[in-house]
């Protein structure tokens, strides 16, 4: 009877060791799967962030180009208006200077 009890204890220990080894192997596999999933999630996150950054850069470049075009167009219009306004004034000023010179130096006609 003692031998049977000892045999059962030894069998229980052997079975417990098998269970512990199987549990350790399963835990290792679960950890490896978790690490792999974590790496995949990080890679997907990096890819999504890079795509978002690229998209934002493109949107920013497009908005800046539109703003630049609007500013340039307004500048062209303003410059054209100044030029048109100045042409009449320059012509008037030149006439005035010419008239004064003619009067001062006694020239009546060229």
Image (tube, helix red, strand yellow):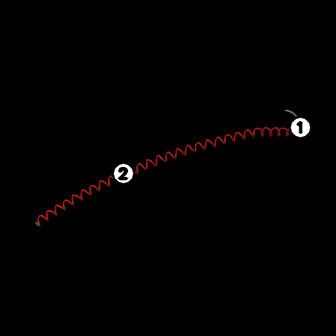
Q: Is residue 27 depicted above or below 83 in this figure?
A: below
Q: Residue at x 45, y 48 (%)?
A: 48
- For the point 41% across and 48% down, the residue is 44
Q: Earlier in the sequence, mark 1 or mark 2?
A: 2
Percent from the top left, x then y, of residue 47? 43, 47
Q: Outermost residue toward the right?
A: 106
- Where residue 21 appears, x then y in whole percent? 24, 58
Q: What label sits on residue 37 in the rendered view?
A: 2
Q: Give the distance between the C-alpha atoms of the residues marked 1 and 2, in whole angstroms.
A: 99 Å
Who is closer to the viewer here, 44 or 11?
11
For discs 1 and 2, the disc positioned in front in the rendered view = 2
Q: Do the residues bearing badges 1 and 2 touch, measured as CB atoms within 8 Å?
A: no
Image quadrant assignment for residue 105 = top right
Q: For this rendering, which residue is in front, 100 or 11?
A: 11
Q: Residues within 10 Å of mark 2 (few under 14, many from 20)?
A: few
Label ID, residue 98: none
Q: Secondary structure at mark 2?
A: helix
User: Which residue has dot 1 on it?
Assistant: 106
Quadrant in the rendering for residue 76:
top right
**Quadrant of the drawing holding the N terminus:** bottom left
Instruction: Give how far across and how far down residue 57 sits, in percent.
Output: 52, 46
Q: Residue at x 62, y 42 (%)?
A: 70
- The residue tagged with tag 1: helix, strand or loop? loop
Near mark 1 (Cα within 10 A), the count class, few <14, some 14-19 or many ≥20, is few
| Residue sitting farthest toward the top | 110
| In this rendering, position of residue 49 left or right of residue 84 | left
Q: Quadrant of the C terminus?
A: top right
| Residue 50, placed above or below residue 18 | above
Tell me where residue 65 appears, x and y as whole percent. Answer: 58, 42
Q: Residue at x 64, y 40 (%)?
A: 73
């Amino acid at each position: 009877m003692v031998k049977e009890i000892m045999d059962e204890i030894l069998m229980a220990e052997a079975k417990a060791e098998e269970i512990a080894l199987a549990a350790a192997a399963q835990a290792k596999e679960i950890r490896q799967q978790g690490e792999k999933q974590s790496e995949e999630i990080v890679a997907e996150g990096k890819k999504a962030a890079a795509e978002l950054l690229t998209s934002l850069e493109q949107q920013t470049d497009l908005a800046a180009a539109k703003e630049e075009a609007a500013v340039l167009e307004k500048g062209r219009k303003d410059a054209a208006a100044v030029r048109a306004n100045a042409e009449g004034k320059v012509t008037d000023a030149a006439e005035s200077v010419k008239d004064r010179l003619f009067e001062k130096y006694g020239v009546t006609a060229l």
